[in-house]
Amino acid sequence: MNLFFEYQKKDYKSLSFLEKPEDRVTFKSILNKLWTERKKFGLTSVYFDDNSKQTEQQFFSFHDTYIKAGNYIGSIKYGENTVHIIPKILKKGLNNNYTESELLNISNKNLLWWLSRCSKIKFPKSFTSWNTRDYSFLDILIHLFSSLTRDDIVYNKHQSYIEKEESIHTLRGRIDFSEYATNYHTGNAHVLPCIYDSLEINNLYNQIIKFTSKLLLQHTDNEEITKKLQEIIWILDDVEDIFLTAADCERVVVSPLNDNMKIILDYCKMFLSGMSIRSEDNELEIFTLLIPTEKLFEDFIFGFIKDKFQYKFGIRDIIAQGDEFGRQLPLAVEKDKTGKVIKKAFRLRPDIYISRDSNNIILDTKYKVIYTKEEAKQDDRIENGVSISDIYQMIAYTIKLKVNTCHLIYPDYLGVENDLYTHYEIEHGGNMSISKIFYHRIPALIKDDNGELDSIIQTKEEELYEVFNQII
């Protein structure tokens, strides 16, 4: 199994598809193409930084004798090989008798849970009666798409009115008189060229579903998924086979009352939008889903808090990436030697700003592994606790955004149970005000490989709710 943790190094010799230098050149060129087109990745495009100035791909770094994973999680299907990149917070599992297969399964469960709570994308929130074992993450996404789509079109084939032109003997719709004039003068006055609206299954939405299903058949070997995709294609047998792109998804008019249709279309957009790319010699194809982990973790926490606490008594609003009015205020202004303002500098973007009836608070997520002194000593690590840069950032928030309390939110990781409910107090010079900066290691990680995913998520969310209920 080609399994990486974030930031893990692996020798080329341990990866059969990268042993030869020319294979590494091809793989790197395809990753660069994916990086260039990363904003087209449908559902996950929102997690890539628009302001990144990096022209070279950041998924992996290539060195003389080894390759190193970046801070992206997901799967890459490259030719006959599948590469899995899983969260670094699972790494200690190897020392706790977890197998790579078990860790991959745990990673898949966590990815589904985190995505289900994210605010920036539409993703299913129910995973009843199936588990993630023996699925790659790409297979999981295809499984979710095929299950939802098949169940939906069995009961609703989404017929829509399409304008048609047809020469018939009885009037239907309206007559195309410019065409009829020709018929009249050529002795075919009995033939009526009509333009009418017909309720058809052969519409753009169904064409997109059929094309996507046929595309996905080429990228899965799982028998259960293959069967579902074939059922979709069979149900849509009367739908025309045409080549389509992600841009065509934007042309479909979706009713705001039809949530399933919107989700299915989002899946199709994701699968059609740059995730399947061929090498320059057209011999190898890469099919991938990679998400920057810190962005995913941040959106998961915001989405969970928004869903659970938005209408709680005493809460006015919950805002992402801004102050209580959604503004990204500058920390400072830059001036020239005459005192003229050149520009506003260092825009403040707190992850979560919670406006309350009493005092407002800020929550800032940090996708880092944080250690107590005892844990650091046990793992032979020099550093422990919160980094000084995180504290400086919180101090800037408390001063500029006039908030006295900030909370740093860190994920827990395999091998720990302590939630680290600790804080710093910082006095501000002459005005005698005090800033409180709390830091927490929250239960945002599924650690159990067994059981139905729905029940596991329900238990974890109850636990997570209790933690945030004390904070908020």
Image (cartoon, rainbow, N blue to C red):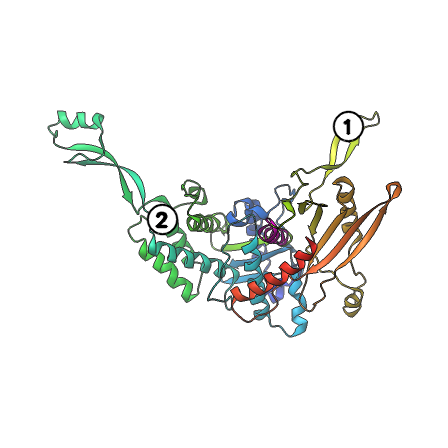
Q: Taking 169 as reference, is 224 left or right?
A: right
Determine whether the residue tagged by mark 2 lies in a helix, strand or loop: helix
Vertical order, 124 against 172 (above or below):
below
Task: Residue 44: give x, y in percent of width and height.
Answer: 54, 50
Judge left or right: residue 351 versus residue 433: left
Q: Return the disc, 2 or 1, that comes first in the chain's sequence.
A: 2
The residue segment tinted magenta is 297-311
Per the image, label 1 sits on a secondary structure element best described as: strand
Q: Nearer the viewer, residue 434 or 109?
A: 434
Name the residue tied to disc 1: 341
Q: Quadrant of residue 338?
A: top right
Residue 321 seen in the current view: yes
| Residue 300 located within the stretch drawn in magenta | yes
Local packing at callout 2 (Cα closer than 10 Å; few below 14, some 14-19, many 20+) is many
- Nearer the observer, 152 or 60: 152
Residue at 40%, 62% (x, y): give it. Answer: 226
Residue 464 position by quadrant: bottom right
- Using the image, determine if residue 65 lies above or below residue 336: below
Q: In this rendered view, identify the residue nearer to me: 187 or 35.
A: 187
Q: Which residue is mark 2?
A: 206
